[in-house]
Amino acid sequence: MIISPYPGQHVVLWYAEKKRFRAPYHGSRGLIVKIAQGPGPKNIAVLLDNHAGTVVVPFGNLMTETQVETLMVKNRKVAKKSDKQIQLF
């Protein structure tokens, strides 16, 4: 999750695994256009790179590309460990 987003920042839309089936833009890259101000949920408008238009997403569903790469590496390590445990039995 991004700590302090700003307009012009490049981001990746990333949803939780249990909500990905309802999220057609999961994994899409884009550029932050506008950040909501005021009380209430902090939503952010993102202009998608694939020319799909502008999408408004909750603040918690945005990551930088380096955060996504780190997450993918961690997931691969966990998968390798679980494969080794399965082979032992």
Image (cartoon, rainbow, N blue to C red):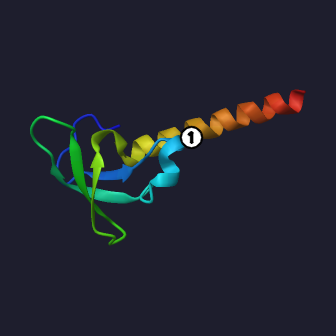
Quarter residue 75 falls in = top right
Quarter residue 79 falls in = top right
Instruction: Write the residue at 50% across / 39% down.
Output: 71
Which image quarter holds the C terminus? top right
Q: In this rendering, does residue 15 appear at all?
A: yes
Q: In this rendering, does residue 63 appear at all?
A: no
Vertical side of 2 occupied by 32: above or below: below
Instruction: Write the residue at 21% across / 38% down.
Output: 41
15 relative to 11 in the view: left or right: right
Label 1 crowd bin: few (<14), some (14–19), many (20+), radius 10 Å:
few
Q: Position of residue 40 (x, y in %)?
A: 17, 36
Residue lying at the far bottom of the rendered structure: 51
5 relative to 62 in the view: left or right: left
76 relative to 53 in the view: left or right: right
Residue lying at the far left of the rendered structure: 38
Residue bearing mark 1? 73
32 relative to 62 in the view: left or right: left
Q: Position of residue 37 (x, y in %)?
A: 10, 42
Q: Position of residue 4 (x, y in %)?
A: 22, 36
Quarter residue 50 falls in = bottom left
Vertical side of 29 occupied by 37: above or below: above
Please, what is the three-letter code of the amino acid marked with disc 1? Answer: Val
Q: Which one is nearer the viewer's eye here, 40 or 2?
A: 40
Which image quarter holds the N terminus? top left
Q: Secondary structure at mark 1?
A: helix
Residue lying at the far right of the rendered structure: 89
Instruction: Write the residue at 50% across / 49% down.
Output: 20
